[in-house]
Image (tube, grey):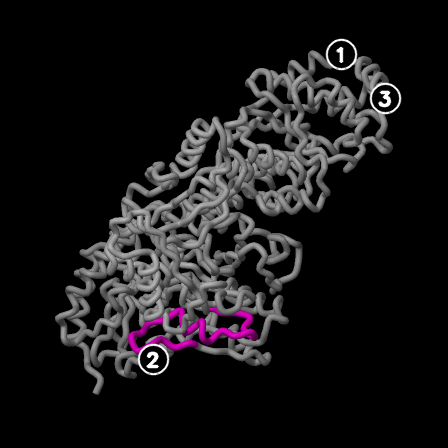
Amino acid sequence: MQKEVIMIKNGEIALKGLNRKSFEDVLVKNIKWRLKTLGKFSVTRAQSTMYIEPSEDGIDFEEAVERLQKVFGIAAFTRALVVDKDVDTIKQQAVNYMKDTLPYAKTFKVTAKRADKKFPLQSPEIQREIGGVLLQAYPHLKVDVHNPEVTVTIEIRDFGAYIHAEQIKGAGGMPVGTSGKALVMISGGIDSPVAAYMMAKRGLQLHAIHFVSPPYTSDRALQKVETLCEKVSEYAGKINFHIVPFTKIQEAIRDNCPEELFTIIMRRLMMEISMRVAEENDLKALITGESLGQVASQTIGAIATTDDVCTIPVFRPLIGMDKNEIVEISRKIDTFETSILPYEDCCTVFTPKHPKTKPDLQTVRDAQAQFDFSQLIDEAIRDTEVKVIRTLS
Amino acid sequence: MNNKEIYLDNSATTKVCQKSIDAVLNAMQNDYGNATSLHRKGFEAEKLIINAKKEICKALMCNENEIFFTSGATESNNMAIIGSVLANKRRGKKIITTVIEHSSVLEPTKFLESMGYEIVRIKPNENGEFLPIDFFNAVDDNTVLVSTMFVNNETGTILPVCEIAKAVKAKNKQTIFHTDAVQGFLKMPLKVKNTDIDLLSFSGHKIYAPKGIGGLYIKKGTKIQPLLYGGGQQNGIRVGTDSVPLISGLGQAVAEILPQREKLLSNYKELKNYLISMLENNDNVIINSKQNDAPYIVNISVKKIRSEIMLHYLEQFNIYVSSGSACSKGANSHVLSAFGYSKDRVDTALRISFSKDTTKEDLEFFVEKLNDGINSLAKMK
């Protein structure tokens, strides 16, 4: 017996309380789905630990580890080698398993935990034995029990002996799907993919909506947003991507509404369409990447006028964040480089020279009422294209 | 000369596969736009480039924005070595490489040597192996770059590049690690994800794509000083109008070969064992390749018959093999010498390299004619 496994201890699963069982079921389902294309894995729970192990040969374990780091609901996990509970085997395998780490370290220590009390050696003895053999194999090493560069953990469990590698940080958050479903409005800028990531992290399963205005916006601009969704889906899992044709509505706004209100009315109409799409798909909230005061349409007044048309919650996870904080996350989830590609998007078409920052709600309502958009909205929804985005290769 | 062509020089170059040819033609006849043009014709061409990158990313396990196309591996190696050293001058003036590199790595390091850089060339140990610990010991605070090949073009020797990279970074995080992976790309399993490899060169024509196209993987965050300046294509790292036909041809060759990699690898192993079994009891033949070397390259020496003579003898029967490396036409192999082989053994070395189309029958015919040659050709004194 000799195979690598991933162990997630109870304390490392982010959820607690009465819902734990059903949350864990979702987490197991998400883990399996995420690993599916790599081969067969078994996910089991025993002794307050979740074990993820390949159940066929030739599986890319490194890639599995990488993917697990993007599964929400796991705070941390550990890679380990499982070997027979035989002292000589453990010694030999420990030397081999540490061959990528110990040759380059200066100090180390061994800790042992013995859950199986029938094992002939006690924990301090295991530590001494394994420490000795490692010192023999890597004679340049020194033992440092207080502040070692590398800690080698040996755990004797019922099923076998586990030689641990270092603990790996997980993505944190809650399993995607445990909080329900929501629709993220995505433009192509830096903020909305970050907002999508943050709400997926809180357990929401995502749909995304994007507005296109050809010929004012190009195929490349749409491709860019699709790429952003793909990158978010590495964390968020499957995303249904709704592409709404918006040209006629934008032209109608330009022809019928006062210039300083173009952006606000456009955003109200986008909200209305989004709510309709949310309703049709049983999505319980909208998500936007707004950050208070960042631009004219993200002031309290402007947000109040857009929320005026909303009857479901609008989550704005970035509302209190600075641009540099948002950029930091976008770099972490690898959306930044794509977000800054310089294509026109629907928000930058027909931007007023002097947008209203403190719009009066009634004025906005009246201005919008000068034209009946309902037919154009119906048409846009009817012609909306839906693509399923999932990054699993 | 009516014999079937038996091409056993696939480490020099390969025959372009049909899928690649089709892709090249399509990008010349239909999607012929300039990939940086704003209109749809341009976008269609750009999509071909994006697709090619996706295929390469599947093979290497990296991100699309980490792939840069070049005119071939020689340019990739020059760009990697000179470009990274120039862009990171403050990190030091020492470069570590090996004694068995291809000339497109050797010559740039010589150029940098003439500019005042110290070059350390690691030798194999007595078993012909390169050990990570030797690199760990060679790296110091002043080391800016380590460059080692992945698979040697003459002998098929495999270097443990992932482990070497890890050892290098364990000693000095600032040191950049480059690998010339031309002879291993798409043949041996190698991915850059989760490794300490910063730069990786690959070539198209060794893997059934046309000549004149190759690439360099540049890990996100690794700085490279461009060697060419112009229109800003490929983020300014490698400028010049993108060669959409060749890029697309490369992408499709990768798409064709990648799913077959495991199968081909086991084919090669079988072919290598078969060839060796036919030669190992022949007193006139020394097998230079080892069991652990790449299975698609077999290097042998034929006693007392100079490589070139045997090569031309075989070509009469439409059989094509190589003497040492194809680039160094006739020159003595610095690689075989580095492994400590005698001059006679180096002078008489032949390289037989397989492709996806090589068969056991091809090898049987090769061995038959090789034996004929051994019996009929005049021997050296």
Disc 2 residue type?
Ser
**Measured Cα–Cα span from mark 2 to mark 1:** 85 Å
Q: Nearer the viewer, mark 3 or mark 1?
A: 3
Instruction: Give the magenta part as a residue range.
Output: B122-147
Residue B140 belongs to magenta span: yes
Judge from the rendering whether residue B301 lies leftward or rightward of residue B252; answer left or right.
left
Q: Quadrant of residue A91?
A: bottom left
Is residue A79 positioned above or below A218 on the image? below
Give coordinates of residue B307: x percent, y percent: 28, 75
Q: Which mark is residue A360?
A: 3
Chain letter for mark 2: B
Instruction: Tell me the SS state at disc 2.
Output: helix
Give coordinates of residue A340: x percent, y percent: 67, 44
Instruction: Tell me the SS state at disc 1.
Output: loop
Q: Residues within 10 Å of mark 3 (few under 14, many from 20)?
A: few
Residue depicted at 53% across the width and 40% down the height: A172
Q: Which mark is residue A372?
A: 1
Chain letter for mark 3: A
Along the viewing direction, whichever of A183 and B236 lies nearer the viewer: A183
Along the viewing direction, whichever of A95 and A252 lies nearer the viewer: A95
Residue depicted at 26% across the width and 82% down the height: B344
Disc 3 residue type?
Asp
Along the viewing direction, whichever of B139 and B292 lies nearer the viewer: B139
Q: Which mark is residue B337?
A: 2
Residue depicted at 54% across the width and 54% down the height: B68
Whether label 2 touches label 1, CB < 8 Å: no
Instruction: Tell me the SS state at disc 3.
Output: loop
Disc 1 residue type?
Asp
**Measured Cα–Cα span from mark 3 to mark 1:** 20 Å
**Measured Cα–Cα span from mark 3 to mark 2:** 85 Å
Question: Earlier along the polypeptide chain: callout 3 or callout 1?
Answer: 3
Residue depicted at 63% across the width and 53% down the height: B235
